[in-house]
Image: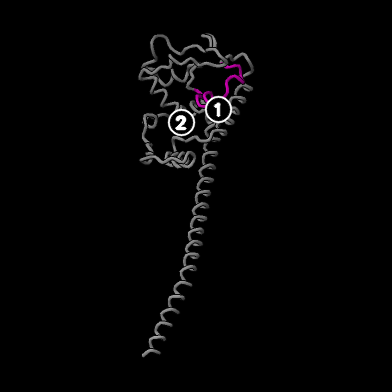
């Protein structure tokens, strides 16, 4: 499941602000975890409770930035968390392309902003039916955060890779949805055509029997008239 990068970033900030951490995450890549120098922490102590949005954005090591690209990409292509492995622009380009490729090769993915379409694609892909329809919640913790245009622009800049990935994902998602809809309509048309064909054949078999029955009744009546 992918999400609008700004909403996702704000949601993670609120989550961390309430005391959430990822201390148990090993961030394994190429068989090892990153060193403290490769992945410094943004806070001291047990958690980052009460962190302001400004502090959250100012930490350059914050893994919330471009999280969706990083979690979809093959980090081994760029030396994992070793930022000295290659220059930043090359690293970003490789990460984004890797994330796009991996997303494209997945049998299914959904978008938080399109719950019903996500449900439809899941059911069509895996031939499964959910008991109840997905619900679209447009009011979330992220949507309740009142930010100015300058802050929104800053978040978009911090998540510039996720922004590009999300646009790609949305386009691919809607293409898959339209294709599945067209495929479903085509199958329904073929099904209705087959049903009409079977009905015609059934009627065609019935007509000779009805005509034969009418002939038999007529002959029986004529024989009775002859006897009378």
Looking at the rendering, which quadrant does residue 215 occupy? bottom left
Looking at the rendering, which quadrant does residue 10 occupy? top left
Q: Earlier in the sequence, mark 1 or mark 2?
A: 2
User: Residue 150 appears at what percent x and percent y?
Assistant: 47, 28
Cα distance between the residues tagged 1 and 2: 19 Å
Q: Is residue 30 left or right of residue 123?
A: right
| Disc 1 crowd, CA 10 A, few/some/many (<14, 14-19, 20+) | many
Magenta residue check for 102? no
Question: Dot 2 corresponds to which residue?
Answer: 149
User: Residue 75 appears at what percent x and percent y?
Assistant: 57, 20
Which residue is located at x 55 percent, y 32 percent? 103
Residue 227, disc: none
Which colour style is shown?
one colour
Secondary structure of the magenta portion, mostly?
helix
Judged from the image, the secondary structure of the residue bearing numbered disc 1 is helix
Q: Which residues are magenta?
A: 65-80
User: Residue 217 appears at what percent x and percent y?
Assistant: 41, 80
User: Residue 38 appears at what percent x and percent y?
Assistant: 54, 11
Single out the mark in the foreground, 1 or 2: 1
Residue 161, disc: 1
- Quadrant in which the C terminus appears: bottom left
């Amino acid at each position: 499941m992918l999400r609008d990068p700004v909403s996702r970033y704000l949601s993670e900030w609120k989550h961390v602000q309430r005391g959430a951490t990822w201390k148990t995450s090993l961030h394994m890549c190429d068989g090892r975890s990153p060193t403290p120098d490769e992945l410094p922490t943004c806070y001291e102590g047990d958690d980052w409770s009460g962190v302001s949005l400004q502090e959250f954005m100012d930490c350059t090591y914050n893994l919330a930035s471009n999280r969706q690209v990083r979690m979809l990409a093959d980090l081994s292509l760029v030396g994992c968390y070793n930022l000295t492995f290659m220059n930043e622009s090359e690293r970003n380009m490789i990460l984004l392309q890797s994330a796009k490729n991996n997303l494209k090769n997945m049998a299914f993915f959904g978008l938080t902003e399109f719950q019903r379409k996500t449900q439809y694609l899941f059911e069509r892909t895996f031939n499964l039916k959910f008991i109840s329809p997905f619900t679209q919640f447009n009011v979330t913790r992220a949507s309740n955060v009142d930010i100015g245009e300058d802050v929104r622009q800053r978040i978009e800049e911090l998540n510039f890779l996720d922004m590009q990935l999300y646009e790609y994902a949305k386009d691919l998602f809607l293409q898959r949805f339209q294709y599945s809809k067209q495929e479903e309509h085509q199958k329904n048309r073929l099904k209705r055509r087959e049903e009409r064909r079977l009905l015609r054949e059934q009627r065609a078999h019935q007509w000779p029997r009805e005509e034969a029955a009418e002939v038999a009744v007529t002959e029986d009546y004529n024989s009775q008239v002859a006897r009378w």
